[in-house]
Amino acid sequence: MSDGPTRRRVVISGDVQGVSFRDATRREAERAGLAGWVGNRDEGSVEAVFEGDADAVERLVEWCRSGPSSADVDGVEASEEEPQGESGFEVR
């Protein structure tokens, strides 16, 4: 296991658009010191990329399984990617 950064892409489905999911995700990611982005997808899901400390990335992936209290998450698909050296976290 490497000590370097980890990168995970997640797609969150359910009632997740129009419920402040992206802004809440940004706040959680910044609090955890992670880089990456979050955005709405055309078919109604939310997609996010988290990059940084492996434990913090895993915590954010787990957080996405419930999201903010206003969201109704049906599922989360997570996949591992090569770290890209992202800095900062943006809402797209």
Image: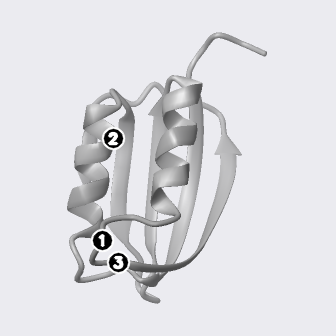
Is tag 1's residue or tag 2's residue first in the polypeptide sequence? 2
Q: Position of residue 28 (x, y in %)?
A: 30, 45
Q: Amino acid at mark 1?
A: Ser
Helix, strand or loop status at disc 3 = loop
Q: Which mark is residue 69?
A: 1
Q: The disc labelled 2 sits on which kind of residue?
A: Ala
Residue 50's spot in the image, x, y percent?
Answer: 47, 42
In this view of the protein, which residue sits in the foreground, 57 or 51? 57
The quadrant of the picture occupied by the N terminus is: top right
Q: Which residue is mark 3?
A: 71
SS under mark 2: helix
Marks 3 and 2, how far apart at CA: 17 Å
Above or below, comparing residue 17 to residue 29 in the picture: below
Residue extending furthest toward the right:
1
Question: CA–CA distance between discs 1 and 2?
Answer: 17 Å
Task: Determine contact: label 3, label 1, CB under 8 Å.
Answer: yes
Q: Tag 3: residue type?
A: Ala
Where does the image place residue 37, in percent across and percent down from the top left?
35, 49
Residue at x 66%, y 41% (from the top left corner): 81
Question: Which of marks 2 and 3 precedes in the sequence?
Answer: 2
Q: Which residue is mark 2?
A: 29
Question: Which residue is rendered at x = 33% and y = 27% of the image?
Answer: 33
Regarding residue 86, the answer to whether it shows in the image is: yes
Question: Could you classify mark 2 by the number of other residues whose Cα lies within 10 Å: few (under 14), some (14-19), or many (20 or more)?
Answer: many
